[in-house]
Image (tube, grey):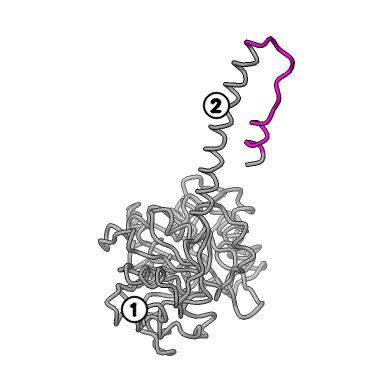
Amino acid sequence: LKCLQASSEVQPATMPASTAISHRASAAAFAAATALAVAAIRWRMRRLATQRLCASNAMHRRWAQRMRTFIFDIDGVIHNAGKPIEGAADALAVLRASKKKVMFMTNNATKSPADIVELFAKFGAVAHAEEVMTSAVAAGDFLSRKELKGQNVYVVGMKALVNSLRDQAGVHAFGGPDDSSKTRDDVVQGFLPELDPPSAKVAAVVVGADFEFNYYKLTKAANYLRHNPECIFVATNPDPRALLGPGVIVPACGAMWQAIAVASGRQPDIICGKPSVSLARHMLATQGLDPDTTCMVGDRTDTDIAFGRSVGMQTLWVESGSMSEQELKDVESMQVPHFMAGSIAILRDLLK
């Protein structure tokens, strides 16, 4: 803004009167155009300003009533490390009672939809398996579309990811929990003269969050990718960290696949979970959702909010997860949420 304003104030050097008049007219036109540009930028900045939802605000209450569908992230939104976030279960119940469609989209590839339903039940929240999409399910869908049935796929991740790839894509998924107890000694003794199975016979390496990530898994994944350019590098999601509890973070999938990327010299060919725009479009199409009346709710702007904004959804960022309000101030425009709140308990209060 300052550059635009300054450029309109530059004074011409000494010149003939007729030329000066012409220059002043041009300068006036330029100043008017600059003023319009500045006004447009300021209007755009106001549009991007995030509003804090307030239960007593009539406009916010009308907005909540207008929304037909809410898609929730799970970790940091419904619970943190299995501990329920206060008011979350009540908010889901009020949404269902208000005839809102409730869905869940999580980048957590360590749990299956059935696992999530069971977890929710422990703290009185209701979810149905068909309402839940995980990044492990998205990775399985991707491999299925690649027609890799029967081929070898090395997995760095938990049992839920291995099972999802087997069930959805029909691949021979190996590694995962089976490699959790292996050490560098196993690398030295078992990787020469070649890996088993050999690199040429591994169609993909799939990486999700792995609570038992180790040197053996890192080495094996990196070698498959480095020695077979045709091997597809699949990451379930980009999240670098998750919140364990107040003030304590833990490494998430992004930290693990980046280690493999550095060791192998390759970047993922695809990152399946949020903020994938193709996944967002797929959800809208298969569920028959109108983005204008659908709200994506999450605790991360780089995944949840970017995911919603990529297809024109409304977005709500909550402070109950792994990002702070201070971090919110520095995000890119496509990651700026429409609304913010302490937690999803605000939705209960808006719809009462």
Q: Residue at x 53, y 54 (%)?
A: 224
Tag 2: Cα neighbours inside 10 Å, few (<14), some, or many (≥20)? few
Q: Secondary structure at mark 1?
A: helix
Left or right of 312: which side holds 242? Answer: right
Q: Residue at x 54, y 81 (%)?
A: 81
**Between residues 327 and 246, which one lies in front from this camera angle?**
327
Q: Which residue is mark 2?
A: 29
Work out whether 84 lies above or below 267: below
Tell me where residue 209 appears, x and y as whole percent: 53, 68
Dot placed on the residue nearer the N-terminal end, 1 or 2: 2
Tell me where residue 237 appears, x and y as whole percent: 49, 61
Quadrant containing the C terminus in the rendered view: bottom left
Q: Residue at x 38, y 53 (%)?
A: 278
Q: What mark, if any, has residue 254 been given in the picture?
A: none
Q: Amino acid at mark 2?
A: Ala
Q: Residue at x 29, y 59 (%)?
A: 290
Give the residues in magenta: 3-18
Q: Secondary structure at mark 2?
A: helix
The quarter of the picture where residue 152 lies is bottom left
Tag 1: Cα neighbours inside 10 Å, few (<14), some, or many (≥20)? many
Q: What mark, if any, has residue 95 been given in the picture?
A: 1
**Between residues 352 and 316, which one lies in front from this camera angle?**
352
User: Do callouts 1 and 2 mark residues in contact (Cβ within 8 Å)?
Assistant: no
Work out whether 204 lies above or below 17: below
Is-magenta flag for residue 90? no
Distance CA(mark 1)–CA(mark 2): 54 Å
Tell me where residue 305 appears, x and y as whole percent: 48, 61
Tell me where residue 284 appears, x and y as whole percent: 31, 59
